[in-house]
Amino acid sequence: MNDFESALRQAAGSLPAEPPASAGAKLADRAAADGLLDVAYATVDSPLGPLVVAATPRGLVRVAYSEAVSRDEVLEDLAARVSPRVLEAPARVDEPRRELDEYFAGRRQEFDLPIDWSILRGFTLKVLRETARIDFGELRSYADVASAAGSPRAVRAAGNALGANPMPVVVPCHRVVRTGGALGGYTGGLERKEFLLRLEGSLL
Amino acid sequence: MSVRLPAFQSLLDVHGSDVYRFCVAMVGAVDADDCFQETWIAALRAYPKLRRADNLRAWLFRIAQNKAIDAHRARSRRPVPVDSVPEPAAPPPAVGGAEDSEPELWARVRELPPKQRTAVFCREVLGMPYAELALLLECSEDAARRNVHEGLKRLRKEYSR
């Protein structure tokens, strides 16, 4: 009896602690091949701290400063707004990772990657699409962006839309500042906005 | 209307290791990787249609159990090579067991009926509550308890032989 109990303990203890390291990538590849990978993400290092970068088969859907919003919050939000089929799959976000690296290294001024706008609606979508057209090194006011989005008086709403930008850096909401020159707010904290504007030469 | 399902990755993070251990115990180290992948792909396929987000572990292990049964069937259909030289029989494991030799207990567990196999693993390795085991096995709590009991009784009998 006791021998059996100890054999049972030993058998349980003999099982591997974890699946092989390659199992996650293998699963992500197979999921993508079978059309089951709705949201792929990876955590990427940047001078502004780790970023969570996520893409759907249509394009980039999320960039998050993971020191400002936790990875889990980002994933739960994507699960609710896009699809619960969310998997870590660094190979699927190679392109945005590479472009972000180049941008932070000062070797890229424009992002050429496809963007999935489908989680955005209405005025927020309009404001962020207009924001995506602001060139590297340029600045706009909240009023400019509100006008460009078709509602010159909706300055505050434009500010809210920018605050809800799901793709900071790539959709350059940091290039929108207050009329008169004050920086205004930023999703990732003001010091990040300052860093980006310095990188682009807009702030000395 | 619809339930709020957690991001699938969080299921993999929380239950991946236990599911892998289950696969190793149920089908052996060689076929465990395939069993593991098949389980998670099937889970991912069905996931958005789930109506409830509670008892996700029982749901996952039910899928894993089915994939392990598939693996057993596939193996029994696999042709046995007759023209190859049989490998010399492995020496019996030393008392206390070498680190990398699989305890023969799992081989014996694999000979139990499927529900008993799952029940023994989930109870003895995971410490799963009977209520959850009942959901997994789609039976009553009493029946779940009996599956554990019967499985252990048979193993114990064979062990003392």
Image: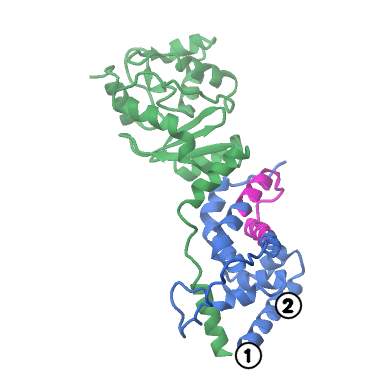
Chain colours: A green, B blue
Read off the chain for label 2. Answer: B
Q: Regarding mark 1 in the picture, which secondary structure is present there? A: loop
- Where residue A58 appears, as percent x and y from the top left, is 56, 27
Q: Which residue is drawn at 33% across and 34% down?
A: A48
Local packing at callout 2 (Cα closer than 10 Å; few below 14, some 14-19, many 20+) is some
- Where residue B92 appears, as percent x and y from the top left, is 51, 82
> Which residue lies under the disc numbered 1?
B161
> Which residue lies under the disc numbered 2?
B146
Magenta region: B39-68
Local packing at callout 1 (Cα closer than 10 Å; few below 14, some 14-19, many 20+) is few
Would you place residue A94 above or below residue B117 in this image?
above
Q: Can residue A193 be seen in this view?
A: no
Instruction: Identify the image quadrant of the C terminus of chain B.
Output: bottom right
Foreground: B155 or A170? B155
What amino acid is at disc 1?
Arg
A119 with respect to B137 (left or right) = left
Instruction: Identify the image quadrant of the N terminus of chain B.
Output: top right
Q: Is residue A49 visible?
A: yes
Q: Residue A125 in magenta?
A: no
Q: Residue at x 71, y 44 (%)?
A: B49
Q: How far apart are marks 2 and 1 (CA)?
A: 23 Å
What amino acid is at disc 2?
Arg
A80 with respect to A98 (left or right) = right
- Where residue A135 appears, as percent x and y from the top left, is 38, 13
Q: Regarding mark 2 in the picture, which secondary structure is present there? A: helix
**Which label lies toward us, 2 or 1?**
1
Foreground: B108 or B152? B108
Foreground: A95 or B73? B73
Q: Which mark is residue A62?
A: none
Q: Earlier in the sequence, mark 2 or mark 1?
A: 2
Residue placed furthest toward the left: A204
